Amino acid sequence: MTVATQRQLWALELAQSLLRGLTFLALAVVGYDLLHRANVWNPESVAGYWWVALICGASITLRRRFPAAHLIGVALLVGNPWWFFPVGEFRAIPLVVAAFFASSAGLRVVVALPIGIAAALSSECPRWVQVLPHRSAWGQFIVQNGMSLPLLIAALVIGAVLVGHASYVQRRSADSLRVQNEELARLRDSDRARIANEERTAIAREIHDLVAHHLAAIVVRAQAAARVAEQRPDEPRAAVEWIAEAGPEALAEMRSVVRVLRGDAARSISAGARAPELPETLAVALDDTLDRVRAAGIDVHADIRVPAGMSAMQQFAVLRVCQEALTNVLVHSHASGVDVRLKQVEGGTVLTVEDDGGDIQTKRAAPDLHTATHGGSGIPGMHERAKSVGGTVAAGRSAQGWRVRLVMPNGPSPAEHAPLDALTRS
């Protein structure tokens, strides 16, 4: 909050307090006049009552900004032993009002009570200065007038201070609760935005992994058939037949993911329909993936040794990283062969996908890491997959072409919290 804003708020609060004080004075004037006209109130002197109304109006105006100063000022006025007032107890009203407003504005009880009690006792003993030097006269004054009224006024002041303090505590608690509620609402909105962003990222990653892998294989197979159509007339027919089989498979997998993301899986199960399928084993899913790459014309050398005890999320990460790495081989290189290895090492599991870079005459330079990660979602998606199971992905040039290496620790990771239904058949 800037200084200018604080000044504006201070001026607005002061204006509101001044308006309340003037409203009280106006009501007091109207009340005095009505009582006097009704002939039910005929005081010898009205000046004292005007002073009482004026002091109360000042307390209403200054109660928040200057609690201590205005209580001390009222105490000095009310406790003045030379202020003659026909009805002495009536002038204790401003003191009670000031004590309440001061304590409700935050003045400490240990400060407000001594000031209010001293003023209350002094207001009901207006001749204490005169009689104090003469003990006999002071005692006679106490005997004649008693101390019940001064003590009653002091009790009223004590009650006003305690009620005002309770009001202050309640207001502070309400302000604290309001601030906490606002903070909770802000955190709730932030969590909603974060969750929505995570969901969008997960959906984008799923669709990208499935669509990119299948379409890349289809496109590469179609392009290869087009290039050799004149020399090998039967190749386009074989390619079309293969695409006709691969296309429905890709659509089925997309529908499976969509059902999971829309939450239709549970309804499908309850209705007796077939739920999205999980791969029977990781080895079978990887074999299907490698077969699609082989069908696209890439020579695949595989050494797949699925470690025992892998969690569903770990299998999911291995499958998706392998698919994405092979998709990049199909799309971004002229490799003629690729080596895929999955094995267990001490402390973890390692997946390695490395291509040979292709023939030297047709070889396309392998993309550098910045180009591969900037503007695309393949490698960032692999990093997210690895992170979800506590692993890491390293992608970069190898001696021959391009290598992707996934390393995961043994056992399930605490980060594995995504729904297992997302592990769709591939």
Image (spheres, rainbow, N blue to C red):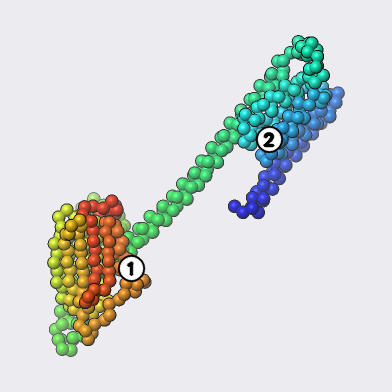
Task: Give coordinates of residue 278: x percent, y percent.
Answer: 20, 58
How crowded pointer 1 is (Cα within 10 Å; few <14, some 14-19, many 20+) is rated as some
Task: Give coordinates of residue 415: x percent, y percent.
Answer: 29, 53
Q: Quadrant of residue 260?
A: bottom left
Furthest toward the right, the residue is 44
Identify which residue is drawn at 76% across, 26% down.
Answer: 79
272 relative to 225, above or below = above
221 or 110: nearer the eye? 110
Q: Quadrant of residue 367?
A: bottom left
98 or 344: nearer the eye? 344
Whether residue 242 can be seen here: no
Q: Residue type at mark 2: give it.
A: Ala
Q: Secondary structure at mark 2?
A: helix
Between discs 1 and 2, the one toward the N terminus:
2
Q: Residue under circle 1? A: 377
Task: Give coordinates of residue 279: x percent, y percent.
Answer: 18, 59
Task: Give coordinates of residue 188: x percent, y percent.
Answer: 44, 50
152 sits left or right of 411 in the view: right
Q: How many marks?
A: 2
Q: Residue type at mark 1: give it.
A: Ser
269 sits left or right of 35 in the view: left
